[in-house]
Image (cartoon, rainbow, N blue to C red):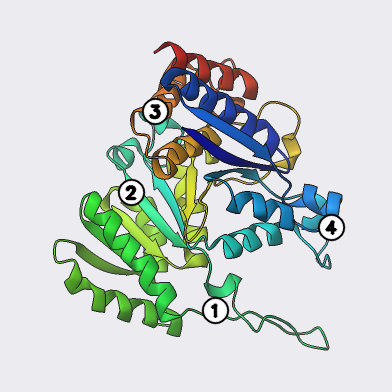
Amino acid sequence: MTYKIAVLAGDGIGPEIVAQARKVIDAVAEKFNHQFDYTEALIGASAIDAVGNPYPDETHELCMNSDAVLFGAIGDPKYDNDPNAKVRPEQGLLKMRQKLGLYANLRPLEPFKSLLHKSPLKTELLEGVDFLCIRELTGGIYFGRPQGRSEDGNTAFDSCVYTKEEVERIVRLGFEFAGKRRKKLTVVDKANVLATSRLWREIAQKMEPEYPEIEVEYMFVDNAAMQIITWPKRFDVMVTENMFGDILTDEASVISGSLGMLPSASIGVHTSVFEPIHGSYPQVAGQNIANPCATVLSAAMMLDHAFGMKKEALIREAVDKALEAGVVTEDIADGKKAYSTSEVGDWLANYIKNV
């Protein structure tokens, strides 16, 4: 069977890290006799520079007609440093999420043993950590209207908006994933202050009787931020709204020892998108030193979630062996020999072919 993959490498280090993920996917194809067809398209700053649109219609059409999307990163300093820019790379990402109906971002956190020493947390806090954060992607303050500035420019405003349907579908997903794991769901909100959070809590409480086997706890976002650092192994599945999830998952990334190690999957109504959680890291773009593992692990999630390939997802095993062998980029090399981005990709591909 042939699987169609839309490749949106994006900006900065995006093309470099996506190239390594493709090497690994091709190794899987060779080993298990699969066929993957790739088609590249523009997104982000590179799309703005080329056609003036961070998410061109042609890119959206490709995504809709593909079985999965492999995504790199977006962002460019020339837009970050211009507060008056009317078109921004990040608008392309938000538009893609909205048009593809990507309402849920899955971010698993299961640190590799060989990297526990790289985390700022004590090892005893990290052993046994394995939780999944499910972040709502299409609602909340990032999409709420009205949004803007007053006519005199002295006041700015954003609106946080959620509907019952939006909350119910993401919370239900949380319950379903908890049922497949250790049967514990943490609903993160700020219900003591925010009306939208009170809606979240109300809906989740009404859904509880449908899932009697699931232990449910409700936690304010500030407490959740503290618990992730002080007792991360208490979590199994966490579900939360858009901005809270954005912040908490970046905070949780330190547990892995490097931001370059965390994958994610965005799923929803149409084609799912698989991407690393880090940004475009323009400072090192083109230097062949960026860590490709988060993108490679996102490819593993793609094989599993989009294509139902279980054995083929031995990519995580390959990454684990590379870490043990010290075949790593400079961000986690600990002063020892650092391998280039492409060398890490080659090692991972060769491991999969020969294991």
Q: Residue at x 29, y 54 (%)?
A: 177
Q: Point out the residue furthest to the bottom here.
A: 151
Residue 131, disc: 2
Earlier-in-chain disc, 4 versus 3: 4
Report the Cα–Cα distance between label 4 and label 3: 39 Å
How many discs mark residues in the rendered view?
A: 4
Res 256 → quadrant: top left
User: Label 1 crowding class (10 Å Cα cut-off): few <14, some 14-19, many 20+?
Assistant: some
Residue 160, disc: 1
Residue type at mark 4 is Gly
Res 146 → quadrant: bottom right
Earlier-in-chain disc, 3 versus 2: 2
Is residue 300 depicted above or below 197 in this figure? above
Report the Cα–Cα distance between label 3 and label 2: 22 Å
Q: Position of residue 246 (x, y in %)?
A: 52, 59
Is residue 246 depicted above or below 352 in this figure? below
Side of 72 where 169 appears, left or right: left
Residue type at mark 1 is Cys
Earlier-in-chain disc, 4 versus 2: 4
Q: Residue at x 83, y 65 (%)?
A: 85
Mark 4 and mark 2 in contact? Answer it, CB < 8 Å: no
Residue 52, disc: 4
Is residue 317 depicted above or below 299 in this figure? above
Earlier-in-chain disc, 2 versus 1: 2
Residue linked to disc 3: 312
User: Label 3 crowding class (10 Å Cα cut-off): few <14, some 14-19, many 20+?
Assistant: many
Report the Cα–Cα distance between label 4 and label 2: 40 Å
Earlier-in-chain disc, 4 versus 1: 4
Q: Nearer the viewer, residue 328 or 127?
A: 328
Residue type at mark 3 is Glu
Q: Nearer the viewer, residue 230 or 250?
A: 250
